[in-house]
Amino acid sequence: MSNNILKPENIVLNKELINKEEAIRYVGGILNEQGYVSPEYIDEMIKREDITSTFMGNYVAIPHGTEDAKKAVLETGISVVTVPEGVDFGDGNIVKLLIGIAGKGDEHLEILSQIAIVCSEEENIQKIIDAETKEEVISMFSEVN
């Protein structure tokens, strides 16, 4: 993954989040603050979650916008937030790793496939959740390239 897609400013470790909506707004807020998306993208992330959950299993959720949100994406990027205490995504699904995605054009598909490779191993997910530095998180994802 290129350095401008995942940089230290996009990562928050050991965050406490109350519920699913707060969690999605938080990862979307990072994407907005770092200039990847305009503010309306965050609302589209909530809409996407209402349509179908972005919970992927193994304590991972990958919030992203709807197809209509494409116009709100300024640049491809991801945000990573660890929630060691977990946040309830409904139906007993607890999320400890949130990965917010904004992709220009079809770039989100490549990002998703790279994230899937990293997150396909439970031990990788645990390493990210347990990470003490943002550099540890970046190195977990950069190994994919």
Image: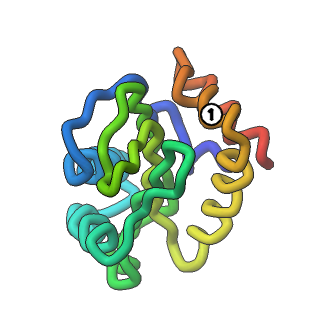
Q: Is residue 23 left or right of residue 105?
A: left
Q: Secondary structure at mark 1?
A: helix
- Is residue 119 found left or right of 28 in the rendered image? right
Q: Would residue 37 be visible to someone looking at this image? A: yes
Q: Give coordinates of residue 57: x percent, y percent.
A: 53, 52
Residue 48: quadrant of the picture: bottom left
- For badge 1, the amino acid type reads Ile
- Where is residue 14? Give x, y as percent: 38, 23
Which residue is the extreme one toward the top? 132
Give the image location of residue 40, x and y in percent: 21, 68
Front-lying residue, 18 or 144: 18
- Residue at image position (25%, 35%) is 17
- Name the residue nearer the viewer: 7 or 25: 25
Q: What residue lies at 40% left-to-right and 83% top-to-bottom?
A: 67
Q: Is residue 114 left or right of residue 137?
A: right
Vertical side of 83 occupied by 30: above or below:
below
What residue is shown with label 1?
138
Asked whether residue 33 is in view, the answer is no
Residue at 62% across / 43% down in the picture?
A: 3
Q: Residues within 10 Å of mark 1 (few under 14, many from 20)?
A: some
Query: Residue at horizontal 51%, vertical 72%?
Result: 104
Residue 128, given in percent of the width and then of the height, sits at 58, 30
